Every structure is written in structure tokens, then in C-alpha cells.
């Protein structure tokens, strides 16, 4: 009798607080506390009435408004997930003593993917710098709450675990090797697929340089040149060479790039590096700029245009201020006569002539010799000879 009155009173009080909104709502939570899940994971629903003693209540779990677990003393419920189990979850508590008093929890909406996810590995740099490291990051797209496992493999060796169940999703790596990772969560533990491998490479301290074998910097269309990749202190290593260029050409994987006829399309910047093996290479060299210009035409000048009797004139030829040029001289007695090579054994920038005639020159350099265009002709008269013979 007394108990009934008390119960009715309690029910009345509870009903008042509930109707007036003072009673706290029941709370349904999930372990792991995430809403995007995968088939194969195990989760636990926890129902908290947030009122009285947990043992005062019976708990029911619904899935899409269907009863999944009938009223029961257990306030938690574990479930192995399949993709079909996506949807709305809710728990309902019924007071053990007060049969008509129930509370509903919030709804939890779970989306469950059928496919096991794959971890993604990324690196902040492509290679490990000299004395430095690379930071690798592992992530599982669209989902949280993971811890991470890290693996490394070195040549001719088994893959080893380098870190496991780590809360940090990144590691710092200063050794070469093949790395991969995966995520895990839940109890029993669920693993993502392993990430792709990240192939970490170490930078050697040897420096690479792109050089031009020729001693000159200005290159002309038609010239034969060789661009070289040189590696400082790397004489005893069998290197593989890699090139990068802004030109439209593809240099070979050799240290030497022979260009038999330079043209404008070879103009651009060139970089190279040496690779010792899969894991070790030099850093890229500084850029070398190749600029191919039009074939030049030398300038010809004379100290006088008329040779006095018994005298001479000095002619000079110039391509520019570069001293690698040799000069070749030609003469015709008149426009009607054959061209005569007057100087090619000891090619010189200046010659002294005592005869009248039409003179021109050209420059040459390198081996085989690359020739400039012909200079303009210049006419030298000799006093006493008939002027009309000549070109001007
Ligand atoms: C679950 O996560 C949400 C935010 O993602 C947070 O507000 C909430 O407190 C978490 N619950 C628990 C039980 O950790
Ligand atoms: C809840 O009830 C149980 C058994 O009835 C008791 O052992 C426990 O101390 C109670 N807890 C609280 C917080 O009242
Ligand atoms: C209550 O739940 C427990 C564990 O979830 C289970 O073993 C038990 O059979 C359930 N009882 C009823 C009556 O459903
Ligand atoms: C939960 O969802 C059900 C329908 O599935 C709805 O009737 C109920 O009002 C919802 N409850 C809350 C607290 O949103
Ligand atoms: C993960 O691996 C399984 C096989 O183990 C494969 O069927 C599935 O497609 C993979 N998931 C992704 C996202 O590639
Ligand atoms: C470059 O110049 C050096 C001396 O300055 C010389 O020994 C070498 O033969 C030259 N190379 C070419 C390709 O002309
Ligand atoms: C480039 O030319 C040089 C000399 O002309 C020759 O020794 C070398 O083998 C050539 N290199 C390549 C890659 O063709
Ligand atoms: C050129 O003429 C000058 C005088 O004008 C003379 O001193 C010089 O020796 C001559 N040179 C040659 C190579 O004939």
C-alpha cells in the first residue's frame, strides 16, 4: 500500500519534471565515436538515461524504428557491422519500478560502407635531404578515430613494423626504404587496407653540375656542342644520369648530351642529377641556361680603302669580343674572278694586304669548325689600278 503510494508519487514527480522539460534526455553514444563506418567493424552502443541509477532502468535498442534488442538490463549493445545496417539507431529506457515511464534517446545515424577503406600515405618532400628527414602522413579518407601502423622494407630484407597503434598520423623518416601504413580502430580491431608504398630516397652530398664542354657561353644555330653532367667526387661510382629541361628536347640518360646541330628548340634550362641506385641520388644541379642564337655575321673594317704605291692596308675581322674565334680571309681580284683563300693556315683577326681587290672574311671555332656567315665584302683599291674593275 505504502509502496504503491510512493511509486505513484514518484511517477507523478518524474512525469512533472519530464513534461516540464527538466528531465534530461537519454543519450545514445557509440564506441568508436564516429558516424562513418565500414562493414567488418564492431561497434558498441551505449545508452545512458542520465537520471537515477543505471540499474534502475531496462534498455531497448531500435534500428530504423524496429526493435533490435528487447528491454534488457544491459545498457550497452555490441554489433558487427555490415553495409545493410546503415540507418537510424535509438535506445529507449524503461524505469524498472515505474513500468509506464520511458525515455527515448537521440537518434544516431550511421553510414556503413561495404568496401574496406585504403590508407593513403603522403610525404612532404620527394627525397630525404642531406642530414634531414621527410615527414610521412597516413590518412583514411572521410573518417576519424584511427590509430596507425607503420612498416618499412629495405632491400633484400623482410618488411618490419616500425610503429604500431600510434595516435600520431605522421612519422619522421631519415632512412631510405619502402614505407607503408594502415589505420586501425575498434575492439575487436578493424584494419584498413595497407597504403601504397612510399619509396623514400636519400640525397647524396655529391653535387651535380651541368656544364658545356665548349669554352664559350653563346651558342649559335648549327653549332655542334656537348652538354655534360658532372658529379663532384663521384668518379668511382657508376652513375645513372637524369635530366630535366624546359626545352622541348629529351636528353639521354648519359652524362653527355651530344647535340650535333644546335637550333632554337634546344634553348632552355637544363638540370641533371646522378643516381647511384634506387635509394640514393644527388640533388638536382643548379640550372644551366642554353641560349641558341642566330648564326652571326662578322664585321670587316680597313684602315684605308686605297693602298698608296708601295704601301699596304690593314683589314680586320670581328665576330665579337670572344677570343676563341679564328678568322678566315678571302679575296677576289674582281667580281668576275674566282674566290681565293688567302689566309687559313694561321688564321688571324688582322691581315695586311698590298694588293687591291674585293675582300671578305668569316669566323670559325670548335672542332669540327663551325663557320659564321660571310662578312660583307670590302673593296680595296691600289693606286694606279683601274677602279672600275671593282665592285663598288
Ligand atoms: C563524440 O564526438 C563528438 C564530436 O565529434 C563530441 O562532441 C562528443 O563529445 C563525442 N562523444 C564522446 C562520448 O566521446
Ligand atoms: C546503483 O545500484 C547498485 C545496485 O543496486 C548499487 O550497488 C550502486 O551503488 C548504485 N549506484 C549509485 C550511484 O547509486
Ligand atoms: C539481455 O542482453 C544480454 C546481453 O546483451 C543477453 O545475453 C540476454 O539474453 C538478454 N536478455 C533478454 C531477455 O533479451
Ligand atoms: C528519431 O527518429 C524517429 C524516426 O526514425 C523519430 O520518430 C524520432 O522523433 C526521432 N527522435 C529524435 C530525438 O530526433
Ligand atoms: C581493400 O582490399 C580489398 C581486398 O582485401 C579490396 O576488395 C578492396 O577493394 C580494397 N579497398 C579499396 C578501397 O581499394
Ligand atoms: C677550353 O680552354 C682550355 C684552356 O683555357 C683548353 O685547354 C681547352 O682545350 C678548351 N676546350 C675547348 C673545347 O676548346
Ligand atoms: C658524344 O660525343 C663524344 C665525342 O664526340 C663521344 O665520345 C661520346 O660517346 C658521345 N656520347 C654519346 C652519348 O653519344
Ligand atoms: C705596311 O706599311 C707600313 C707603312 O705604311 C710599313 O711600316 C709596314 O712595314 C708595312 N707592312 C707590311 C706587312 O708590308
Image (spheres, helix red, strand yellow):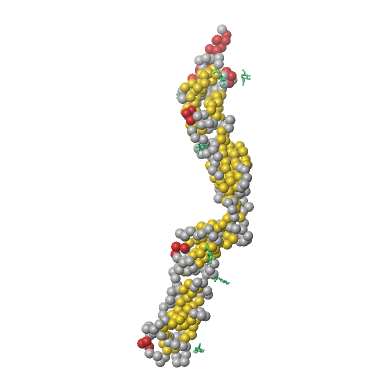
Up-down relation of residue 328 to residue 311 (above or below)? above
Of the pair 224 and 145, the residue shown nearer to us: 224
Measuring from the top left, give residue 144's x and y in whole percent.
54, 36
Measuring from the top left, give residue 168's x and y in whole percent.
59, 40
Query: What residue sits 56% from the left and 39% below the top?
Result: 182
Locate residue 276: give its quadrant: bottom right
Question: Residue lying furthest top in this view?
Answer: 1
Query: What residue sits 57% from the left and 62% below the top?
Result: 230
Q: Does residue 348 appear in the picture of this structure?
A: no
On screen, residue 108 versus residue 128, left or right, reads left
- Quadrant in the picture for the N terminus: top right
Of the pair 77 and 158, the residue shown nearer to us: 158
Question: Residue lying furthest left in this view?
Answer: 388
Measuring from the top left, give residue 95's x and y in whole percent.
54, 17
Count of numbered marks? 0
Query: What residue sits 61% from the left and 60% below the top?
Result: 234
- Quadrant in the picture for the C terminus: bottom left
Up-down relation of residue 324 to residue 313 (above or below)? above
Of the pair 138 and 6, the residue shown nearer to us: 138
* Quarter of the rendered structure image containing ligand 2: top right
Query: What residue sits 51% from the left and 72% below the top?
Result: 367
On screen, residue 354 versus residue 392, left or right, reads right
Up-down relation of residue 89 to residue 366 (above or below)? above
Q: Does residue 141 appear in the picture of this structure?
A: yes
Measuring from the top left, give residue 258's x and y in whole percent.
51, 64
Amino acid at each position: 500500500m505504502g509502496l504503491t503510494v510512493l511509486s505513484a508519487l514518484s511517477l507523478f514527480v518524474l512525469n512533472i519534471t519530464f513534461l516540464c522539460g527538466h528531465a534530461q534526455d537519454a543519450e545514445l553514444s557509440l564506441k568508436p565515436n564516429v558516424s562513418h563506418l565500414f562493414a567488418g567493424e564492431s561497434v558498441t552502443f551505449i545508452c545512458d538515461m542520465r537520471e537515477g541509477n543505471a540499474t534502475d532502468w531496462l534498455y531497448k535498442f531500435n534500428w530504423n524504428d524496429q526493435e533490435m534488442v528487447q528491454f534488457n538490463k544491459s545498457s550497452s549493445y555490441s554489433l558487427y557491422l555490415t553495409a545493410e545496417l546503415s540507418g537510424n539507431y535509438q535506445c529507449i529506457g524503461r524505469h524498472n519500478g515505474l513500468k509506464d515511464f520511458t525515455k527515448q534517446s537521440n537518434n544516431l545515424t550511421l553510414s556503413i560502407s561495404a568496401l574496406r577503406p585504403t590508407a593513403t600515405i603522403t610525404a612532404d618532400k620527394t627525397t630525404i635531404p642531406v642530414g634531414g628527414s621527410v615527414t610521412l602522413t597516413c590518412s583514411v579518407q572521410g573518417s576519424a578515430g584511427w590509430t596507425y601502423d607503420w612498416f618499412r622494407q629495405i632491400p633484400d630484407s623482410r618488411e618490419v613494423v616500425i610503429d604500431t597503434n600510434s595516435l600520431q598520423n605522421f612519422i619522421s623518416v631519415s632512412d631510405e626504404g619502402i614505407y607503408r601504413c594502415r589505420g586501425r580502430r575498434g575492439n575487436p580491431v578493424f584494419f584498413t587496407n595497407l597504403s601504397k608504398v612510399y619509396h623514400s630516397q636519400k640525397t647524396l652530398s655529391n653535387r651535380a653540375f651541368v656544364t658545356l664542354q665548349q669554352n664559350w657561353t653563346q651558342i649559335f644555330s648549327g653549332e655542334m656542342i656537348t652538354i655534360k653532367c658532372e658529379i663532384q667526387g663521384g668518379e668511382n661510382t657508376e652513375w645513372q644520369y637524369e635530366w630535366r629541361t624546359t626545352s622541348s628536347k629529351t636528353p639521354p640518360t648519359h652524362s653527355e648530351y651530344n647535340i650535333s646541330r644546335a637550333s632554337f628548340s634546344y634553348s632552355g634550362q637544363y638540370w641533371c642529377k646522378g643516381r647511384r641506385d634506387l635509394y640514393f641520388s644527388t640533388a638536382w644541379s643548379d640550372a644551366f641556361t642554353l641560349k641558341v642564337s642566330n648564326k652571326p655575321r662578322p664585321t670587316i673594317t680597313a684602315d684605308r680603302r686605297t693602298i698608296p704605291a708601295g704601301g699596304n692596308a690593314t683589314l680586320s675581322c670581328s665576330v665579337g669580343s670572344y677570343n676563341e674565334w679564328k678568322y678566315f680571309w678571302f679575296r677576289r681580284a674582281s667580281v668576275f674572278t674566282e674566290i681565293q683563300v688567302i689566309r687559313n693556315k694561321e688564321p688571324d683577326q688582322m691581315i695586311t694586304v698590298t694588293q687591291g681587290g674585293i675582300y671578305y672574311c668569316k669566323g670559325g671555332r670548335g672542332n669540327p669548325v663551325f663557320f659564321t656567315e660571310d662578312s660583307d665584302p670590302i673593296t680595296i683599291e691600289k693606286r694606279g689600278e683601274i677602279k672600275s674593275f671593282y665592285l663598288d
